[in-house]
Amino acid sequence: MLVLLPPSEGKAASGEGPGLDLGSLVLPGLTETREAVLDALVALSRGDETVALDVLGLSEGLRGELARNAELRTAPALPAAELYTGVLYDNLGLADLAPDARARAEESLVVFSGLWGVVRITDRIPPYRCSGGVKLPPLGGLGAHWRGPMAAAMPELAGDGLVLDLRSSAYGALWKPTGEIASRTATVRVLHERVVNGVAKRSVVSHFNKATKGRLLRGLLESGAQPGSPAELVEALRDAKFTVEAAAPTAGKPWALDVVVAEL
C-alpha cells in the first residue's frame, strides 16, 4: 500500500544535524526539478520581501519565513515525519506508534510538497514555506511544473498495490493516478452526519476532515492490515470501526470512499 499525504502549513521550527542532500530524497529522478524549484524559491525569498510575501500568500506576521527560505541550501534538515505538525499529523501521531506500525508507516507513507514534489517520511528536509498552489516566478504554477516529472516518476513508487490518496486538491494537481493505477486508487471524503428535527443531514467537513484522516490512517497502521485493493481497504476500515460507504467506479477511475462520522 502506498499512502499519499498532503504536507501541513504547521512545521517544526528548525532541524538538527546535516543540511539538505537532494540526491538522498526518494525518486532521485526528480532531482533536477527539485533544484529548479529550490533555486526559484531561494531567489524569490532573497529579493523584494513585499513581492515574496504576496507570491507565497504569507501575511506580514510570517515575514520571518522568507529568511528561512533564503537559507534552505544550508539549513539543518530533519525527517519529514518530524517536520510536519498540522492537524492530520497530530492525529496520526507518528512519534508514538509501536515499532511494527512505525515500520509500516515508513514503508508506505509519502508526503507531497510544492517544493520537493514528494518525500518519504524518513527523508530529511529543512523547514520551508511554499504551498502547492503557488505560482513561483519564473516557473509558474507549481502544479503544472511538477506534473510531467511526477507522471514519469510516480508509477515506480506506486508499484502494483493499493494507492490510498489522502491529499487535498492543491497537491492532487501535482500527480493524478491514471489508467491501471487509478483503478487501484482510493480517495477519501469525510462527511459529518447529524440529526436535525429527526432528519439525518450530512455535510463535508474541513478541519475535522484532516483529523479524521489522521485517525483513520493510524488505525490502519496499528491494525496491521495489508489491503491490496480498494475493496479490501473498505473492509479493513470497517474492521477498524469506521463507517465507510463506497461504490466501485467505472474503469480507469479511482474509488471514492465516504467516511461518515457522527462526532467531530
Image (tube, rainbow, N blue to C red):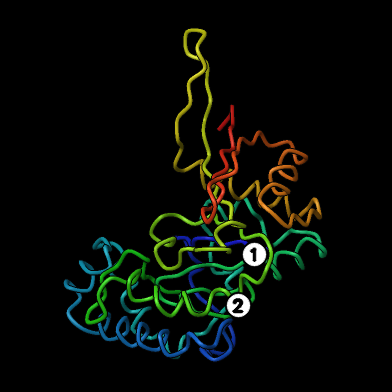
Q: Nearer the viewer, residue 122 or 72?
A: 122
The front one of 220 and 129 is: 220
The quadrant in which the C terminus is found is top right
Task: Where is residue 119? Give x, y as percent.
Answer: 55, 75
Looking at the image, which residue is at 45% across and 67% down? Answer: 175
Q: Which residue is identified by label 1?
A: 2
* Relative side of 70 to 97, left or right: left
Q: Gap in Å between the C-alphas at discs 1 and 2?
A: 11 Å
SS at mark 1 in the image? strand
Proximity of marks 1 and 2: CB atoms separated by less than 8 Å: no
Question: Which label sits in the foreground, 1 or 2?
Answer: 2
The residue positioned 26% from the left and 63% from the top of the image is: 57
Q: Residue 3: horizontal and vertical position, in percent?
A: 62, 61
Q: Quadrant of residue 54?
A: bottom left
Tell me the crowding category of disc 1: few under 14, some 14 to 19, or many 20 or more residues within 10 angstroms, Cα based: many
Which residue is nearer to you in this view: 72 or 30? 30
User: What amino acid type should be assigned to the residue bearing mark 1?
Assistant: Leu
* 42 on left or right of 83: left
Q: List x then y, in percent, for residue 79.
A: 60, 75
Residue 230 at least partly seen: yes
Q: Report x, y in % for residue 149.
A: 43, 80
Rendered image: mark on residue 72: none
| Amino acid at the residue labelled 2 | Glu
Query: Which residue in the protein does label 2 denote?
Result: 156
**Residue lying farthest front?**
251
The image shows residue 263, relative to residue 29, as above or below, that is: above
Q: Residues within 10 Å of mark 2 (few under 14, many from 20)?
A: few
